[in-house]
Every structure is written in C-alpha cells, then in structure tokens.
Image: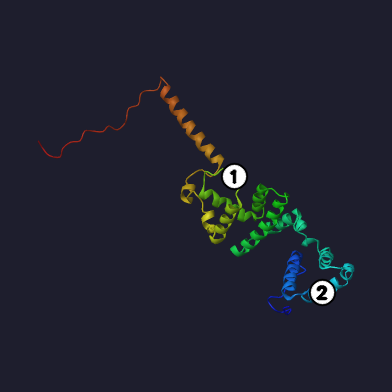
Amino acid sequence: MPFRQEDSAPSFNPTQPGSLLHYFEDLEQLFERCGIQDLAEKKRWALRYVLIEVADLWEYLPGWTSATDWAAVKRNVAAHYPACDYEHRYTFADFTSLIDSQASQEFSSIAQWSEFLNQYLVISQYLIARRRLDPLEQQCYLLRSLSPSLRLQVESYMYRINPCRDPEHIMSVVEVDTAVAHCLCTPELPHTMLTKPLIDESDRSRSPKTVEQLSALVAKLVQKELTKLEYQSSPSLPVITPALAIAPAQSSFAP
C-alpha cells in the first residue's frame, strides 16, 4: 500500500462528497493488488488516507464497528454523504443558483468563462439525463447566466454575422460559446465612437432648434404666399412692368 503523501495514494475531499465513491474504488483496487482480504485491515487503510477529523467521524459511526463486510462499511459511510449518491448529486436548485450567481458578475477572461461553462454543462446534462430539465431550457438558461452588458454584446455579434436571423431563434450552447469567446477577445468600441452625433453641429445651428421655431417659420412662409396670391388676383391694381430693362449688348467697335 502506498504512503499517505504519495501521488498514487487514494484521497477523499469532504467538501466534494461525490469523490467518496471514487475513493472506495481506488481502495478496492489497492486491496486487490496487495492481497488484502481482512475487513479490519481494510478499515484501517480506509481511515489512514483521509483527514483526521473525517477519520474520527467514520470510526465512531454506529455501523462502522458493527459492519460484517466491506459493502456494509461503504453503505454506512455513504449514508452520511447524501451528495455522493449519483441519483441525487445535483438538483434544479443547484442549477438556478449557479445561473443567478453568475448573472451578476462579469467574465474577466475566456478561462473563467470555460470554467463556468464546464460546470454549467455538467449540472445541466445531469438534469437532462434525469428528465428534470429540457434541452431547450438548457439553451435559454445559458443566456440568462450572462450579465446584461455581455448579453447585449452577444446579441449584437449574432446580428452582425447573420442580419436575417430569426429573432425567435434560441441560440444553441455552441453558438453562445462562440459568441462569448469572440466578445471577450474583441475590445469594445471607444465610447466617443458610440456617442458621436450623426448630425454635424454646423448644420444643426442653421436648422430650427425647437418645434415653436419651426412652426413660426412655416407660418411666415404661408403668409407670404397668401399675400402674393391676393396681390396678383386683384383687378384694380395696374400691371407693373419691370423698372429696369435689359438693353441689347452693343459692340464697342464702329461699323
């Protein structure tokens, strides 16, 4: 049997109860390789590779001393770690808690996004396999896990690569992964570019500033046209000819 500090020694982390079954499997492989058959010796080695406080807990379990075979030992220990049971490893509450906690944070790197996505897929695929989650819900909840600013960037990216995309289309996990990776690698546009006015200030200064000014300008033009029509339609007014006539051009050279 390997020493406790050796790399080949089995280990169990109580903060990750799911590793308990792997711990017992590693022990059983070592028992078979080393020819260990005695139950008392198996118990001794099982306590040797765990933390002291974990060993104290196991040793004083009621079923630890009364167990007559190795299978009973494993059952009694596993009963104190419900999360190690594969049928109840993850719940829908764990899934929504992961989403809500991430939605209020920003991803600082692709590595951080990949770590979250891997955890998201592990839990969601587990729930799908247990018929507690639908694949379509898996796609929808992934978008919900993004912060509002990142979600806006992702939707903008998807529109740029396909402007004719159906707005009702729900992005797949692969599409979201690709879009998020692109957004995290591509810097955002400078703020000045986003806030630059579309109308030049010089043009704006020559145009009416308010609705009241525009209304006054229209009223002035209408009044001018009405006055002109009234003047032209009056029969008592003499016909006014131009005061200046354009004389034909004369040559400066004598005939």
Query: How many residues crowd mark 1 within 10 Å: few (<14), some (14–19), many (20+)?
Result: few
Q: How many marks?
A: 2
Q: Nearer the viewer, residue 203 or 2?
A: 2
Q: Is residue 232 above or below residue 22?
A: above
Quadrant of the rendered image containing residue 80: bottom right
Would you say 5 lies left or right of 201 here? Answer: right
Q: Name the foreground residue: 255 vs 177.
A: 177
Give coordinates of residue 181: x percent, y percent: 57, 59
Q: Is residue 197 left or right of residue 46?
A: left
Q: Amino acid at mark 1?
A: His
**Residue, x 62% and y 61% (percent of image)?**
114
Q: CA distance from mark 2 to mark 1?
A: 62 Å
Q: Where in the figure is residue 185, as x and y percent of width and height?
A: 54, 61
Q: Earlier in the sequence, mark 2 or mark 1?
A: 2
Q: Position of residue 153 (x, y in %)?
A: 58, 54
The location of residue 216, given as percent across then percent down, is 53, 37
Quarter of the N terminus within the rendering: bottom right
Kind of residue at disc 2: Asp
In the picture, measured across the screen, residue 233 lies left or right of residue 129, that is: left
Query: Which residue position holds label 1?
Result: 169
Residues at circles 2 and 1 in contact by the CB criterion of under 8 Å: no
Q: Nearer the viewer, residue 116 or 85?
A: 85
* Label 1: element kind: loop
Which class describes the residues within 10 Å of circle 2: few (<14), some (14-19), or many (20+)? few
> Of 245 and 63, which appears nearest the observer?
63
| Residue depicted at 57% across the width and 52% down the height | 175
- Residue 38: mark in rendering: 2
> Does the rendering let one see residue 34?
yes
- The residue depicted at 77 percent of the width and 57 percent of the height is 88
Q: Nearer the viewer, mark 2 or mark 1?
A: 2
| Residue 232 disc label | none
